[in-house]
Amino acid sequence: MDVRTPTEVADITVNIGRNKVVTTAQTGRLIILSILAGCYIALGGILSVIVGFGFPEITGANPALQRLLSGAMFPIGLILVVVLGAELFTGNNALLVPGFMKGEFGLGAVVKNWSLVYVGNFIGAFGFAWLMVYLAGLTSADPWHSAIIRVAEMKVAMSWLVVFIKGIGANWCVCLAVWLALAGHSLIEKMAACWLPVMAFVALGYEHSIANMFFIPLGMLEGAQVSVGQFVFDNLIPATLGNIAGGAIFVGCVHAMLHLRGK
């Protein structure tokens, strides 16, 4: 299997970052691509809920099995993002860093891209949760109704520090998946590269901000005792900051320093 070397991948990310900055100037196109990414992640989210919590008699006595089933389903979201070229905030946390470090564009361009994509991802994830899941009644009956309420309430019950650290872990895995996908050439290689690290982060219970834009609002729609303030301040903000650290520092910065040509 002929895969790209770490140096070749690092060089590719510079061009990807440059193209993403160009796309940022095309605001309408960027927002549409970002909304699609939010929808794709939400699709993975609902699939992980339906399958992961759909066998309570079995998983009740085998909690790791529930995590494994959910983890096995969730990666379809990142696979669609990577293969179809959608714009995902967490992936961009790493992909824009090598080009920025080489001086191809400034910090303002990075922040603008991240901000617009973040908003688009939220629109897509929340819209999918409301239209394609809540109104469609996918989680209106148990065991899924109780499960999504429990998931939402548990996500806002953790301490700020724990969510932040789990946010680092989630996007470390997601951006490693993106890096691995860039090393492959075929569709199967890219799918496998996305599947393994993302399955790992879901099974380990790490916190992904864009996924939580789906899980927590859906739980709220289904009756979870979670306020908007709890959603934003107790989970979304620390998870987002952790995701930035995990993607930008642990993947983008580290791999650029280690492998980028002409450093």
Image (cartoon, helix red, strand yellow):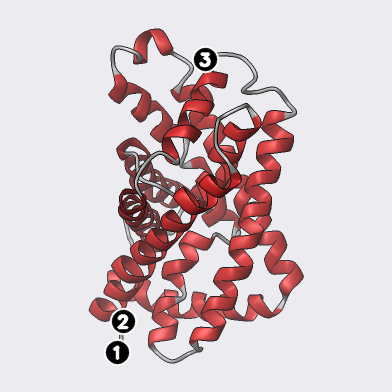
Disc number at residue 260?
2
Front in this rendered view, residue 177 or 151: 151
6 on left or right of 220: left
The residue at the far left in this view is: 258
Marks 1/2: CA–CA distance: 6 Å
**Residue wearing tag 3:** 143
Residue type of the residue flagged with mark 1: Lys
- State which tag comes first along the sequence, 2 or 3: 3
Query: Is the residue 153 above or below the residue 27 in the image?
Result: above
Residue drawn at point x = 32 percent, y = 60 percent: 2
**Label 3 SS:** loop
Query: Is the residue 205 above or below the residue 141 in the image?
Result: below
Residue drawn at point x = 45 percent, y = 49 percent: 234
Front in this rendered view, residue 13 or 214: 214
Q: Quadrant of the N terminus?
A: bottom left
Q: Nearer the viewer, mark 3 or mark 1?
A: 3
- State which tag comes first along the sequence, 3 or 1: 3
Residue 149 coordinates in the image, percent (x, y): 53, 27
Which image quadrant is residue 3 in? bottom left
Neighbours of disc 3 within 10 Å: few (<14), some (14-19), many (20+): some
Residue drawn at point x = 43 percent, y = 39 percent: 155
Disc number at residue 263?
1
Is the C-beta separation of discs 1 and 2 under 8 Å?
yes
85 on left or right of 7: right
Marks 3/1: CA–CA distance: 53 Å
